[in-house]
Amino acid sequence: MGRGNAVRWLPSGRKALTRLAVLAVVLLAGGALYRAFAPPSPEAVSRTALAAVDRLDARELLRLTDPEELRRLNLTEASVSAMLRETLWRDCCPRVAASPVRRAPDMPADRATFPVTAAGVARPDGPTLYVAATDSLDRGWRLHLSFLFYSYCRQRAGSESAGRAAYVQLCRRHGVTGMQDPRGEYHSLEQIERRAREFAAEGR
């Protein structure tokens, strides 16, 4: 295209302003749609989950979790609410939402784990719990809800064997059938209990 043709193609006057205004509106609308419908990041999932814990909002935690995990482990609004009250809410509001969200290193790109310290929960040295999430092509980043409770029990107990035993007892009281770990693998209560006995025999 010659210089003269290029100059003639360029819009001028009112038409130019109209086209620029339309372009600006399209870009703004596109950005808004992307923010509204783009899959959340693992950090966003973690922050939303922690805010839900502080509100005792079992329904929101279920929404963040992969439906397959809910189905396989029998996680329901009633069971999750009861488990929250027996663990993080046993003494007072845990105040985990204010905890810094820093992704643990050395994890694959499609997995994320966040150590969390709760201001309102008595604990041994180290994090109060861990929030884990996995990315999938069809559902985006999803919370491992059972691992949240499992990690809390393990951290609070202070040992591998006692933490696993506490988680098994908690699940059996509320009809939950196991745990999904950060790698996406499922463990039955029987497997967790057997591992607890092995750790106990090792003094761990």
Image (cartoon, rainbow, N blue to C red):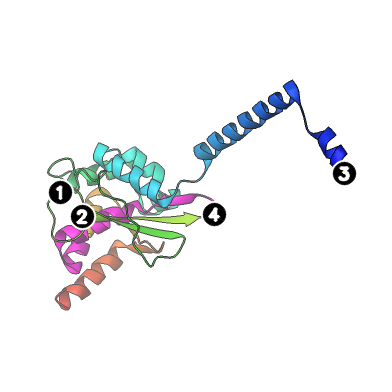
Per the image, the residue denoted by label 4 is: 137
Q: Which residue is mark 3?
A: 2
Circle 2: residue type: Thr
Q: Residues within 10 Å of mark 2 (few under 14, many from 20)?
A: many
Q: Residues within 10 Å of mark 4 (few under 14, many from 20)?
A: few
Query: Residue 7: x percent and y percent?
Result: 82, 36
- N-terminal label among 3 and 4: 3
Q: CA distance from mark 4 to mark 1?
A: 36 Å
Q: Residue at x 73, y 27 (%)?
A: 16
Q: Quadrant of residue 62?
A: top left
Check whether the beta carbons of the residues at disc 4 and disc 2 lie within 8 A of each other: no
The picture places residue 127, in percent across and down from the top left corner, at 21, 57
Q: Amino acid at mark 3?
A: Gly
Tag 3 or tag 2, which sits nearer the N-term?
3
Q: CA distance from mark 3 to mark 1?
A: 73 Å
Q: Indicate the amino acid at tag 1.
A: Val
Q: CA distance from mark 1 to mark 2?
A: 7 Å
Q: Position of residue 103 (x, y in %)?
A: 35, 57
Q: Which residues are magenta?
A: 137-166
Is 34 magenta? The answer is: no
In the rendered view, would you say 101 is above or below 200? above
Query: What type is the residue that disc 4 sits on?
Result: Leu
Secondary structure under the numbered disc 4 in the rendered image: loop
Q: CA distance from mark 2 to mark 3?
A: 68 Å
| Marks 1 and 2 close (CB-CB < 8 Å) | yes
Q: Which residue is mark 1?
A: 121
Comes first in the chain, label 3 or label 1: 3
Q: Quadrant of residue 124?
A: bottom left
Residue 78's disc is none
In primary-sequence order, the first of circles 4 and 1 is: 1
Residue density around tag 3, few if under 14, some if 14–19, many if 20 or more, within 10 Å = few
